[in-house]
Image (tube, grey):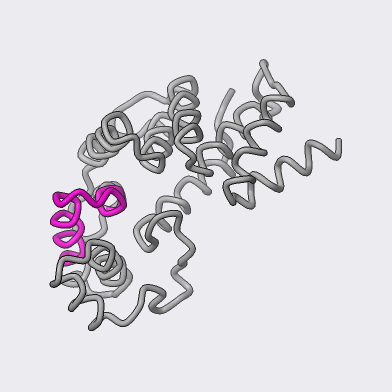
Amino acid sequence: MQWGDIVISRAVFGALLAVCAVGTGAATFAQPNPFGDPEILEAECGEGNLESCSKLANHLVTRNSEESKARSVEIHAATCEKGHLPACGDLAAAYSLDLGVERDEQRAYEIDRELCEVKDYGPACGSLGFTYALGKAGFEKDEGRALEYFVRACDLEYAGGCERAGQHWNSLLNPERDIAKAIGYYKRGCDLGDSYACDGMHRLEAE
């Protein structure tokens, strides 16, 4: 099985959304400031509200200033050290995408691996899946390892992981294509709120 251009482009798009969204990520670059009033976030972050710190950092990374992007990385790092897992995931994305810090895919991989394998953080498992699917961080492309991490992400109730696992089993290029498995993973992703998974499930059920 080979990962097609659609999967790759969506992987990159999903990674970009990760640095401008918190948690499951409903925000997009089209929104000038979906995170809230920056002054309020500054105040709440100063009082120790880690979610506000994470939102503030994500607001800053969407600014055009390199200084703002660099500060966002500092905030993500400090918030991550205090145990806020979404901030750790966003820090990994910053290293992967050269946002406020020099690109370092190996560092991004190390952060995601700890988040996934030690902290059981589903989005990081999904990121590791793409690391192997796309051959990043010095690794060869490995669809088998990618699938393992997508399934783990799904098991941790990260909808995107379920959808990617569904894509694997639905691919016409997969000699072991299994429609039943594809529908099963798509359904899990759909139930968790992934619209792409819902679309995939409905298409297969209509065949």
Q: How many marks?
A: 0
Query: In the rendered view of the protein, which quadrant contains the C terminus?
Result: top right
| Residue stretch rendered in magenta on the structure | 70-90
Specify whether 89 is left or right of 68. right
The N terminus: image quadrant: top right
84 falls in the magenta region: yes
Occupied quadrant, residue 106: top left
Within the magenta stretch, is there residue 75? yes
- Main secondary structure type of the part rendered in magenta: helix
Q: Image check: 55 left or right of 135?
A: left
* Direction from residue 109 to residue 131 in the image, left or right: right
Residue 113 x, y percent position in the rendering: 28, 32
Instruction: Please tell me which residue is depicted at 52% across the width and 48% down the height of the picture.
Output: 9
User: Does residue 47 lie above or below 26 as drawn?
Assistant: below
User: Measured from the top left, where is residue 131 in percent x and y?
Assistant: 38, 34
Q: Residue at x 48, y 45 (%)?
A: 11
**Residue nearest the observer in this picture, 163 or 5:** 163
Please identify the quarter of the rendering in which residue 200 is found: top right
Residue 20: image x %, image y %? 37, 63
In the depicted structure, whether residue 176 falls above or below residue 77: above
* Of the pair 164 and 105, the residue shown nearer to us: 164
10 left or right of 180 in image? left
Residue 179: give x, y in percent of width and height.
74, 26
Q: Residue at x 35, y 40 (%)?
A: 121
Q: Farthest residue toward the top?
A: 176
